[in-house]
Image (cartoon, rainbow, N blue to C red):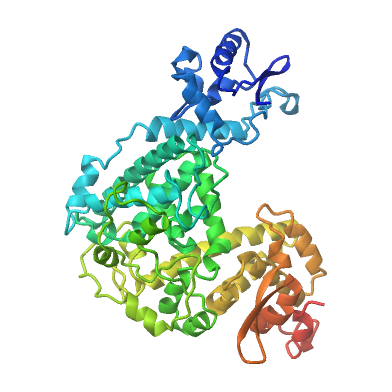
Amino acid sequence: IKCCVVMVADGLIYFRDLLDKECFHSNFEKLEKLSSTTSWEGELDLKRFLINNDNIISAENSSRDFTNLSCPKRVFETLASPTKTIKNMLTVPSSPSSPVNGGSVKVVQMTPVTSAMTTAKWLRGVISSLPEKPSSKLEKFLSSCDTDLTSDVTKRVSIILEAIFPTKPSGHWGGSMGLNCTNAFDIPWAEARKMEASKLYYRVLEAICRAESLNTNVNNLTPLLSNERFHRCLIACSAELVLATHKTVIMMFPAVLESTGLTAFDLSKIIENFVRHEESLPRELKRHLNSLEEQLLESMAWEKGSSLYNSLVVARPSLASEINRLGLLAESMPSLDDIVARQNFHAEDLPATPSKKRAADSDENGDSRSPKRLCIEPRSTLVDQISQTPPAKQSYTLKAKWRPLQSTFASPTVSNLVGGNEKCAEVGVHIFFSKILKLAAIRIRNLCERLRHVEQTEHVYNIFKQILDQQTTLFFNRHIDQLILCSLYGVAKVSQLTLTFKEIVNNYKREQQCIPEVFRSVFVVNTNHNGGLGSRHVDIIVFYNEVFVPAVKPFLVALIPSGGAHPDNKKNPNSICSAL
């Protein structure tokens, strides 16, 4: 029996068949009458969570006439949709003057409900009121390019968002791409989400154009605005925030990457810029993007098929042979025509896609590839595919720490636009590695503090940094926490601390980001009898002894103090490096 539970001061009240279509209207009126005569202070007001397709009643509007919610049928359709859910709806916020704080200090606790309220209010108040098409200012930037890109931008949005929020039966990919609308209630919901994501995309795109134009002192942003990867990343980020706002559990990250044909490394390039240029973004959504960026940095960007490897073969040629040997390169990003075909779109239902030639020309980062398909082509072939004539050098007035986005998304082999002999791949890899080091520094410090060996924080960080710089292959197909745990244990061994791997792992389990796979399943490459490559997954100690120590031993031995209590340690470092 369908029912809805409502929190009131005296306990729980439930209405049988509240969501039944036949009696919904009458029960809706009963609920309104009850809410107008009952004190809701300190409790949950269900009125705030009754959604009218696009709107959620806010706290400041809750005192108004509740009948303004529009037709109860639309409210019923929204509540009945399986694609929307809010976790822990019945979690009651604790009183701000509870005995715990002595009644003198007000403590604001962010519950799942209040978080949903905040983000929904932002989406309703800021984004929903925006125009459905590019603004006049954005159109001016698009029309100021070498060719007017307005039509291409609007067509791309329609195609990519249809792939993420399909409103028609999916093609041969089944439910693997986007949502799978199985009933009539889901279709209007998907249409509304597409509209919200497109509005957010246009808003952030305009802000980025203004910033790029101001910093470069030019209005012609053709290299950036014609870049297919840049637009897809921006659309994907917008869609992900809409999904996060509506607490959609059917399509969890990284499904949005599969729908858009992007890889984790691609998306990592836009998150910081997205947050910087959307100042109205609620704190909860900023945290969501920060959480996504951590996932991208810690492991997803290192997975097989990541476009990170396409940049590494250019930025660090010494790694090219190992990358190709392991078949880590990503395949080409699917064209818009491919996405249309996979989604089984009908030509009369969607605008025509930009020509394949234009799509190829506009995708300056042509080396990027699908996150789920792999290739083992040699580096020479890759470089031939992504080579192009660098744009003419221009004189830029740059702000501190500002980097033009067109360099970030340009082909890895293109020279950096801000001068010097660096390739764009080198700049991109440097930025990516610097973010990894910042994340690792925080995690190393927290773990050392938890183990009460804060004095070893700098040593562990320096070992990790050396590995990233000189033994980068240890990161391939692995999680950065695996290297952090091994670095910490290696430092403990050479420092002769009474610290076991078991103690390190047990304390790591308390860390917020801990997942068992980090210490239970570490990727290791094997060579079979025929000389072919194989792989297996081992526990963290086996990985430490078989792979980590042979590669990192020189860095660890360098930490052994000369003239210490054990002068033979440098002659026989294996005894103090290996895990027993």
Q: Can I make out residue 10 in this image?
A: yes
| Vertical comparison of 71 with 147: above or below | above
Q: Total marks drawn?
A: 0
| Vertical comparison of 282 with 12: above or below | below
Question: Split into 4 quadrants, where in the image is the C terminus?
Answer: bottom right
Residue 295, quarter of the rendered image: bottom right
Horizontal side of 394 relative to 70 (left or right) equals left
| Vertical comparison of 490 with 278: above or below | below
Horizontal side of 78 relative to 462 (left or right) equals left
Residue 33 drawn at (x, y percent): 57, 9
Question: Split into 4 quadrants, where in the image is the N terminus?
Answer: top right
Residue closest to the eye, 252 or 442: 252
Residue 442 drawn at (x, y percent): 61, 58
Residue sitting at 36 percent across and 43 percent down?
Answer: 198
Residue closest to the eye, 310 or 483: 310
| Vertical comparison of 11 with 235: above or below | above
Residue 275 drawn at (x, y percent): 43, 47
Q: Can I make out residue 492 in this image?
A: no
Residue 577, quarter of the rendered image: bottom right
Residue sitting at 55 percent across and 68 percent down?
Answer: 303
Residue 479, quarter of the rendered image: bottom right
Residue sitting at 55 percent across and 26 percent down?
Answer: 49
Residue sitting at 48 percent across and 22 percent down?
Answer: 73
Residue 578 drawn at (x, y percent): 76, 80
